Image (spheres, helix red, strand yellow):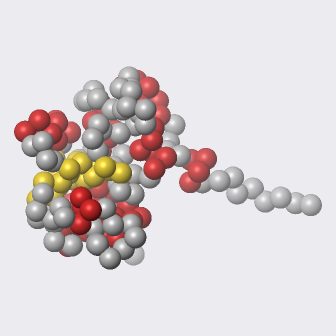
Amino acid sequence: MKTFKEIVAEASKTITELMPWDVEERIKENKDLMIVDIREECEFSRFHIKGSMLVPRGILESACEEEYEDAIPDLVDGRDKEIVVICRSGLRSVLGTQMLQMMGFSNISSMQTGLRGWNDYELPLYDIEKKELDPDDVEEMLSAGFCSAFMHPDRRTIVA
């Protein structure tokens, strides 16, 4: 049996990874660059890169195929476009990037260190209302965990 970290380590050998400052340069150089954020909606609404596209990991594959209700036209038609896949820490994005490669995406990479690294480098992040956030506020949100109230409800047993 393999652990999540072992699976990610294996997958990272098969993909291209960029550091946040490289992604910042790619954004400046390629106005058609697609940033695909594969975190959950509750994470994305807290903070994200301006212009990024939310495609939660759970629907990533079907979002790329025209025949599914989750299809996203930009992804369906994006197999030859430059795409950077991002997540919170750079782990989920490795697996998402590997999957998209297997699905025929040819110019795709994962952002190493994820939005944690982006924020550490003090690159701009925005909330759902398009307001730029202070890096210290984002760090506080990152330290608090993500969407824990939604993702991990209280599982205490009620005894009557």
- Closest to the observer: 69 or 39? 69
Q: Can you say which quadrant of the picture contains the C terminus?
A: bottom right
- Closest to the observer: 87 or 81? 81
Q: Residue drawn at (36%, 74%), measured in percent from left and top?
A: 68
Q: Which quarter of the picture shows residue 127?
A: top left
| Whole-percent x, y for residue 115 in the image | 32, 40
- Closest to the observer: 61 or 144? 61
Task: Please indicate whether residue 8 sits to the left or right of residue 56 in the image.
Answer: left
57 relative to 68, above or below:
above
Task: Please indicate whether residue 128 sits to the left or right of residue 98 in the image.
Answer: right
Can residue 14 be seen at all in this image of the molecule?
no
| Whole-percent x, y for residue 59 in the image | 39, 65
Q: Residue drawn at (45%, 45%), measured in percent from left and top?
A: 43
Can residue 78 be seen at all in this image of the molecule?
yes
Q: Can you say which quadrant of the picture contains the N terminus?
A: bottom left
Task: Please indicate whether residue 159 sits to the left or right of residue 65 in the image.
Answer: right
| Whole-percent x, y for residue 62 in the image | 34, 71
Q: Which quarter of the picture shows residue 77?
A: bottom left
In this view, the residue farthest toward the left is: 29
50 relative to 37, above or below:
above
How many callouts does the rendering have? Answer: 0
In this view, the residue farthest toward the right is: 160
Q: Residue drawn at (39%, 66%), measured in percent from left and top?
A: 70
Q: Residue drawn at (50%, 42%), measured in percent from left and top?
A: 145
149 relative to 56, above or below:
above
- Closest to the observer: 120 or 2? 120
Q: Which quarter of the picture shows residue 26?
A: top left
